[in-house]
Image: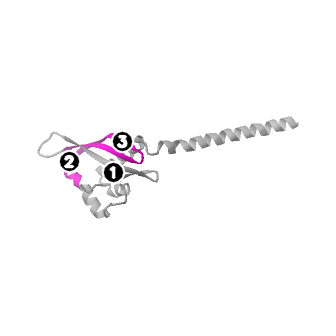
Amino acid sequence: MKNSRFTFFRNCFVVVFAVSLLLLVAGCGPSVREGNTEESLRNAAERYWKLRMEDNYKETYGMEKPEGLPPFEEYSVKAKQIKKFNIISHIVKGVRVEQDKGVTDVVISFIVPPVSKPFSQVIQDQWVYEDGTWLHVFSMK
């Protein structure tokens, strides 16, 4: 009887240890992948430009690095200037990460009337990784 009780407790310990180990590994997985990687920067840039093209400036304003950022009204006027072109697409082509800084190359395709052939322009965006989040560095240029 003593031996069966020992076996029962040993088996319970093994099961609890294995489940705890799995939970620990599963909990650490996403934070490693979601860090300051090229993939996470690409995802942030894709989201940022999708929101910009949808004129969702409140959301993009929240994705900007706060230091040096103008008040929202001034920001939205500047952000809307890109809409004077008839933008037909945007693609995040290049992504580079070095420590907590990143650069994305975004190809914007647009039409300038009366010419019907699309033109493309590469926009280079600067990003910084702070407190677990990629922040866009807004340029007043």
Disc 1 target residue: 51
- The amino acid at mark 2 is Asn
Furthest-front residue in view? Answer: 99
- x, y percentage for residue 9? 78, 40
- The amino acid at mark 3 is Arg
Say whether residue 141 is left or right of residue 42.
left
Label 3 to label 2: alpha-carbon separation: 28 Å
Badge 2, how many Cα within 10 Å: few under 14, some, many 20+?
A: few
Q: Is residue 52 magenta?
A: no
Label 1 to label 2: alpha-carbon separation: 16 Å
For marks 3 and 1 on the same chain, the one whose residue lies earlier in the sequence: 1
Say whether residue 68 is left or right of residue 131.
left
Furthest-right residue in view? Answer: 1
Quadrant in which the N terminus is drawn: top right
Badge 1, how many Cα within 10 Å: few under 14, some, many 20+?
A: some
- Which numbered dot is residue 63? none
- x, y percentage for residue 115? 12, 42
Disc 3 target residue: 96
Disc 2 target residue: 86
Residues tagged 1 and 2 counted as in contact (Cβ below 8 A):
no
Which of the 4 image quarters holds residue 116? top left
Which residue is at 46% across, 54% downward? 131
| Nearest-to-viewer mark from 3 and 1 | 3
Quadrant in which the C terminus is drawn: bottom left
Depicted 117 relative to depicted 131: above or below? above
Q: Is residue 98 magenta?
A: yes
Label 3 to label 1: alpha-carbon separation: 21 Å
Depicted 55 relative to depicted 107: above or below? below
- x, y percentage for residue 93? 31, 39
As helix, strand or loop, the secondary structure at mark 2 comes to strand
**Magenta-colored span:** 81-110
